[in-house]
Every structure is written in C-alpha cells, then in structure tokens.
Image: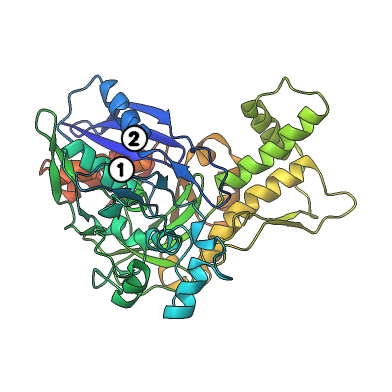
Amino acid sequence: MVSLGIDIGTTNITVLALDLDTAAILESHSLPNPRMRTTDQFSYLQDPYAIEAAVRTLLSRLHQPYACAAVTGQVHGILYVDKIGNAVSPLQTWLDRSALEPIEGTCAQQRLLDRCGKTMPNGYGFVTHYANRLRKRVPETAVGFTGILEYITSRLVGKPLWKSDPSSLATFGAYDPVTKSHDRDIVKEMMGETDLLFPSPADAYEPAGTFGDGIAVGYPVGDNQAGFLGVVADPLSSCLVSIGTSGQLSLYSPTPICPASMELRPFLDEGYLQVGATLTAGKAYETLEKFIHSLLNAYGSTTLDHEQVFSVMKKAALDEPMSHDALIVNTTLSGTRRDGSLRGSILDIGLDNLTLGNLVRGTVDGIIRELLDFTVDQDAVFSSVRTVVATGSAVRKNQLFPQSLASQFKKQVLIAEVEDGSAVGAALIAAISAGRLTRRQSKKIVAELFPSHAGEHR
C-alpha cells in the first residue's frame, strides 16, 4: 500500500513514496528543474522534455513497489502541445512576464483591462497565451495549451489529457471556482477566433488513467491544495504558510466569501482556500545572499560558497541584539500579483542601523509581513485560527523565519518537518482517486506524520 506523490516544482522535481499502512515516508528523491537560458528579459522558461526525463529518472530510483501516483507542482504557466500530445513549446512558467512586454504602446495585461475591464495577474496561463497570440508566437502545430502538471500526467498515462482538477485549471485565470466555469467574454478576448483547446474541469479525485503495470494515476492537483491537504490535519483551526521561491498564506473556508485582497481557490470537493500569494519570498532572501556574496567576491573572499554565506547571514542576525531602530525591508522585488511594476525597498536607514544583522532580519520580517498583510480583511476566518502550520526549507533550516512568524502572526507555529508537503498531499490524492483511501483516513495519516498535529485532529 505505497502511493507516489510527484511534485514538479519551480526549483526542484521530487518523487515521494508514502506508506499508507504505517503513515511513513519511505523514500524521496529530487532533481533540479533549471531555467532555460534566453536573452528575452520577459521570459522565464523551462524544458518540458527535460522535466519528463527527470520524472522518469526519479521513478527508476525508487526501491518500493507502488500502486498509484498523482502529480502536483507549479501552476499558472502554460505550454503548447500538438495533436498527439507532444510539447511544441517550452513551459512558460508562472514567473514568465510576457504579459508585461510592451506592444503597440501597451501590454497584454493592460489591453485585457482596457477591453474587458478585468485585470489578470501576470504569469497566469490565459494572459500569457494572450501575449503570445498578439505577437504571433503560438506554434503552428499547436492544437491547444496545458499546464506542466497536465502534460506530465498525460505522458505517464500515454494519451493527451484535456481535463484537470479545478485547483490546477483555475490557475489559468478567468475561472469561477463556485460555478466551475470560465468567464466567456474574457476567454473570447484572449483566445480570439481560434479553436485551440485548453483543459476543462475534472471531478475531485477522478482517475486519469494508468501506466506501467497498472499503476493508477489521478488527475493533477495544484501544489497549494495538495500542500494544504498533505500537512494540515485540522483545516478549521489552522492556516498554512508556505515559503519557497514564492510565499503563500492559505486559509480554509467552507463558503465562497473572500476578501478582495485574496484569491478564492477550489479545494477538491471540500470547499475553498482563501489564498494570499507573494512572488518573491525565498527568492528575496536568495537575492540578499547573492548581494553579500558579490561583496565578498569584490574583496577577494572567494572561499565561501553560497551555503556558507547563508550561514553567515543567519549567524549575524541571531548574534546581533534586537534593534529598536530596525530596518524596514519591502520584499516585493518582482512586484505583486496585482501590480507587477512594484519593486523592493529598504527604509528607515539611520547612521547606526545599516548592519548585516539588521538587513537580514529586516528581509525575513519583510517576507513574513507581506504574507501577514493578507489577513487585514480576514477577521471572520483568521480569528478562528489557532495554529500556523509552516512549510518550506526556509522555515525548517532557518529559525529566523519561525521566529518572525510567531512574532508577527501571534499564533502557535508548527513546522511541518517534511521536505515536500505537496508531494505528500499528491500521494494522498492518488490513493483516494484509486479507491485505496478515504478522505477521513488521509487526515489520520497527516496527524500521524506530524505528531504535533495530533491534538488538533478531529
């Protein structure tokens, strides 16, 4: 009774084997998912063929036989496929900025606003396609576009797939999670007079097919929903904070009521997630490290590698006494979902507070503050939250992040001590879609995987 979770992350690709009987992670293997080199400043591309090869390599490394699998990972981005399901373009990821590229005095995002009165966040699949269509960059052999999760799932089951779980489908944009339908006017504007295909909604936990020796495969689920299901045992009293390349605050809601500052996302067949997403959480901290590394290199101190510089940063922040004259670091280095033109800043610099420790601590606080700001209009839901469940390597490896979470959120903070909570969630989804597990049983597994959750489970 082993189930696989396959996570196509922006930085890494992971395959995780979960024992459903013992609630234990048996093994986990990862490979990097590099960015494709390009001179286009607006592009952020990855190679779908290299991603498929990495997945198959990771599957070959498994020692355990398994019964089922499901894919999760990065969403929003798109790639084009031909009539037999082969990729005919790179993956334009959620970090792709094609919708902001100037064209005829405007850009795709602004043109959509002008014509339809609606703004779609940069990086969403439909607005990326809109930019490609306006510039005549859609491959001639394309019959449609899909996300990387749908593409890898289709490669596993050996046939094109034109359905996906709404959690993944909604990230293309112009999707109403309540009615499970697209805004026809917006889609018509972005798609134009074409017959290109894009996925339609699948039912929650619907099987997609099989591969190998009858291995059952479920339709893919977005990493946000898979991560929430994989590490949160009690959705009613917990929120999830995920800090990876980007950052996300996720709150469960049984109703579709959602403040304007957050995004309403479908959560399988259980209700909704209210999500506040930032673009540069871990990436902001990494940017600071690169700056400090460049300073060291400028003075000939080339013996420290990047991991050692991260250690120096953490030590400087922990050793330096807390300052009453703290730096205020705004970490919107790549803007926000609503305004891609914003950039970061460092404020309140005085004569004595521009120190390495203050700069590091201010950056961490800025990352967490950007997530906390989403709760300003969230009294109805956030007031019932007792616990912040935090995931990501940053919160596991660097105590500055959980310290800042506890200080700013003023809630109990639990660290999900697992390398990839989304892969755990995908493994549970695979087992449910294959009929080997119930949703209630999956909650018990999560409580057993993370003993600190046990008292919350009900």
Query: Tag 2: residue type?
Result: Tyr
Between discs 2 and 1, the one toward the N terminus: 2
Quadrant where the N terminus sits is top left
Q: Is residue 183 above or below residue 366?
A: below
Work out how far the residue at label 2 is from the one at label 1, CA to CA, in angstroms: 8 Å
Label number found at residue 87:
1
Which of the numbered marks, if any, corresponds to residue 260? Answer: none
Identified by mark 1, the residue type is Ala
User: Residue 339, located in which quarter of the rendered image?
Assistant: bottom right
Q: Nearer the viewer, residue 400 or 140?
A: 140
Q: Secondary structure at mark 1?
A: loop
Residue 21 x %, y % = 18, 32
Q: Which residue position holds label 2?
A: 49
Q: Does residue 295 show up?
A: yes
Residue in the image at 25% along x and 39% along y: 427
11 above or below 263? above
Mark 2 Cα shell of 10 Å, populated few (<14), some (14-19), many (≥20): some
Report the side of 245 relative to 75 (left or right): right
